[in-house]
Image (cartoon, rainbow, N blue to C red):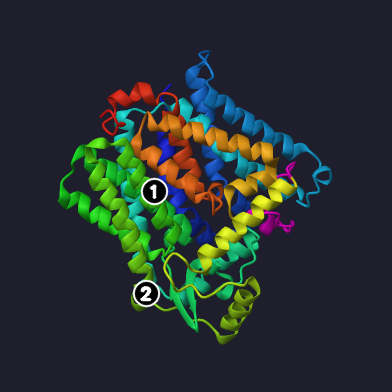
Amino acid sequence: MKRPVWILHAFVVGLVLHNFVMAELYAAGIRGGLLELISAWKETLLALGLALVLLARGTSRPRPQLVDLLALGYGAIVVLYGVLPQRWLDGTASARGVVLGVREDLLPVACYFFGRGLQLGREDMRRLATTIFVTAAAAALFGLIDIYSITLTWWRHSGVPGWYSHQLGFSYNGVSNLPENFIYNTGNGHVFRRLVSTLLSPLASSYVFVAALLLASAWRVRERPALRLWLPLVVLLGAGLLWTHSRSSYIALSLGLLVLAWLISSARWPLVIAAVATVLIGLVFVRVYPQIAPTAAVTPQWLHEQAVEAHEAGAGPAVSGFTDASISSHWQSLRAGVKQVFEHPQGFGPGNAGSTAARTGAVIRAGESTYTQLGVDAGLAGAILFVAWSGLLLWRLVLGLPWLAATFAAMLALALQTDILGVPWIVYVIWTLAGSFAVCGTRQGARLTWRSRSA
């Protein structure tokens, strides 16, 4: 039976378009249970993919390796916490919250084993790279056109507010119920647009651009593509990343480039220089952004509410490079989450942390950091197992595919201050690829052009 690699291509393209399409369907009057069913296309494809790779293997079962056992152990703990009564754990999640929490926590495991069954080779990766480049470039182009030509008023009257608030259950204090990070507020009444593209999120968009830029970097140093093709692609992707105004993603890209430099010795210094340049360009861009970014029209009442909220949070205006109020609040949230996990190491059960708790009405025990959220959802033991699995998975990728190792390292770093498992594109694409190359990487790496340090 043919391997269902097409499903991975569907994830690459479909998950970039998902939120935009769902919002437009909401605006067209398709809502409630029907829209929820349609939005489950990704879970349906993943289940189909798992079934197909199992059928393709037949009675042949590979011998489990340690990385597989860690994935299964982590998944087992998540399932166990999902069936334990909330009152035993002092949790407040609803039944729906528990289901949503378990789904998010288990997705990387399911994607990993889907990838294990795909066993991608060189030609598969070439075709997939093309799909990633085209999709990411199109997302960057649309996002740049959007912030300069599509008004915020259009977004206010689109299906986006309803999709997020009424369909998904989020309560935003942003402009007309749009997510807060649609805009960048420097204080003193100065509000600017950020690139959100079809993912409807500057952060999710930036993570896609980081992955695509790391892939493009590996492509350049190993394949030497023509500059007339490579340079416009990188400039477009880089512009998309810059206009998301996501400082953490600039740092993550720099980290990924340093990992690539370690793995690809033949291009070590050019990649190190690129990593340093990324940070410097990011610093400069953050400072000049208010001079080049399109402004956003907001009401005086909204500005007053934002000022009150910022004052209560003890944050300052976001005006100074990487040391602004946003970075500070991320680290405050991380420290608070770590404290919560160690004070309640048994956890509270799925659905009690992050966006899942926010959209289902539970008490938010930890937010933003993937690791602290897992500590709340599955206890300290579950978080430790996830970290151990992720660490071993990263090491196996180092032996297989450098750009994927670099991307995975960048995402694990971002997970310190964001819910990376809540970004479907990253989980469905990167974890599936990780599963494909984590075990067979050393065997297939010899046939891959973008291979490791010995190359």
Residue 255: assigned label: 1
Residue at the extreme top: 59
Q: In the picture provided, is 445 more to the left or to the right than 269?
A: right
What secondary structure is found at the residue carrying circle 1? Answer: helix
Residue 172 position in % (x across, y down): 61, 68
Asked where in the image residue 386 lies, by quadrant, the reply is top right
Question: Is label 2 in contact with label 1 (beta carbons under 8 Å)?
Answer: no
List the residue tagged with mark 2.
293
Q: Any magenta on residue 361?
A: yes
Q: Counting other residues with Cα less than 10 Å from the Cα at mark 1, is it few (<14), some (14-19), or many (20 or more)?
A: many
Compared to residue 410, the image places residue 382 above or below, namely above
Tell me the magenta residue range.
Answer: 345-366
Asked where in the image residue 72 lies, by quadrant, the reply is top right
Task: Identify residue type, mark 2.
Answer: Ala
Foreground residue among 384 and 154: 384
Res 374 visible: yes
Q: In the picture provided, is 308 more to the left or to the right than 112?
A: right
Residue 360 position in % (x across, y down): 71, 56
* Image quadrant in which the C terminus is located: top left
Q: Counting other residues with Cα less than 10 Å from the Cα at mark 2, is it few (<14), some (14-19), or many (20 or more)?
A: some
Q: Nearer the viewer, mark 2 or mark 1?
A: 1
Q: Main secondary structure of the magenta part?
A: loop
Compared to residue 29, the image places residue 148 above or below, namely below
Residue 69: assigned label: none
Res 425 visible: no
Residue 443 position in % (x across, y down): 36, 21
* Image quadrant in which the N terminus is located: top left
Task: Identify residue type, mark 1.
Answer: Leu
Q: CA distance from mark 2 to mark 1?
A: 26 Å
Q: Any magenta on residue 11?
A: no
Which residue occupies 40% across, 73% down? 150
Q: In the picture provided, is 125 more to the left or to the right than 183?
A: left
